[in-house]
Image (cartoon, rainbow, N blue to C red):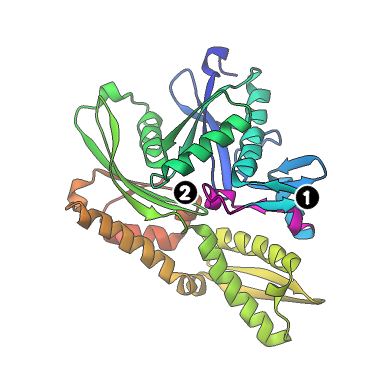
Amino acid sequence: MPPRSTTHAVGIDLGTTYSCLSILTPHGQPQTLPNTEGELSTPSVVFFEGDDAIVGTEALRNSVTCPERVVMHAKRHMGDPQKNWVIDGRVYTPVDVSAFIVRKLLDGAEQQLGVPIKRAVITVPAQFSEIQRQCTVDAGKLAGLEQVDVINEPVAAALCHVLSDGMWFAEIANDQTVLVFDLGGGTFDLSLVKYNQNEVRVQASGGDLHLGGLDWNKALETFVCDQFSRETGQDPRLDRESMQSLSIEVEQVKRALSVRDKASLMVQHAGRRKTYAVDRERFETLTKKHVTATENITKGMLKANRLGWQNVDAVLVTGGASRMPMVKSMLDRISGTTLNTML
């Protein structure tokens, strides 16, 4: 257990699909702390049951049987005053939902560290507006934090890159420029980050706040639903429980195809059950437009800033969706350099 003096402030990655919390060890190394269930990452899902808000894996399980009581992907709606969820007559905003997730992370950290946590830095996409940033701060304070700061996700990635190498910024001899390619569950954040002994700053940024792993999932869901409908005359998209069950299957298949060439999923709807095999080639064909979108955004950002790959010292690849081989292959091809995938 780290000394108590290191536990006053934490770093929180408040993600669209998964979230986590980290501290700096006494040796200056980032360390992710588990939640109360012992998991290093927590699904950003909230299940409302009476007066209780259940966060994480248990909420995800209940999303199949009680989809009307489950809220997911709140980050995609952060800052939208028109978006809310009404459950049992209570209105929940994206800030409310995010606060429950932050509180879940804090509970796990406080259990591990043995002290209350009142200060945190929460990561946000570089493209977040001031309103979205303030909503993130509000969520942290609603969760019980007294001081909340936000940091751009690419800057956090650059900091982690340096600290994970066992270096301090005072040891850096020359200016370094890194391209941070952050493809998460719900957002694509792309930034050029320059750092030296004195500062870390975002030199340029781009991306898409509504492009992420969920869009790859959606493409596969659409393909499978269309096929099931043709074969049975029944459309799973007309039933929330069927679709929630399928969405979990699709997420598992997407992950499996990052390490295997083939996986299978099951569709259950209207008393019918069918299993479909999906190979990596088919999945890549279905989602090619999304990979192309990230490629075009990356090339466009470099061109707009009159920079070439020769100006980039390292390519940091982070975010769960970046683990897909199709994404890594694209980056390998256009950058011509070895990718840093340690984050």
Question: Does the image show residue 220?
Answer: yes
User: Which residue matches tag 2?
Assistant: 319
Q: Residue at x 80, y 50 (%)?
A: 88
Q: Picture coordinates of residue 43 (x, y %)?
A: 63, 46
Is 140 in the magenta? no
Q: Tell me the distance, in whole angstroms, between the alpha carbons under discs 2 and 1.
A: 36 Å
Tag 2: amino acid = Gly
The image shows residue 183, relative to residue 151, as above or below, that is: below
User: Which residue matches tag 1?
Assistant: 89
Q: Quadrant of the C terminus?
A: top left
Q: Picture coordinates of residue 212 (x, y %)?
A: 48, 57
Q: Residue at x 59, y 42 (%)?
A: 95
| Quarter-of-image position of residue 175 | top left
- Helix, strand or loop status at disc 1: loop
Query: Which residues are the magenta region?
Result: 66-83
- Helix, strand or loop status at disc 2: loop
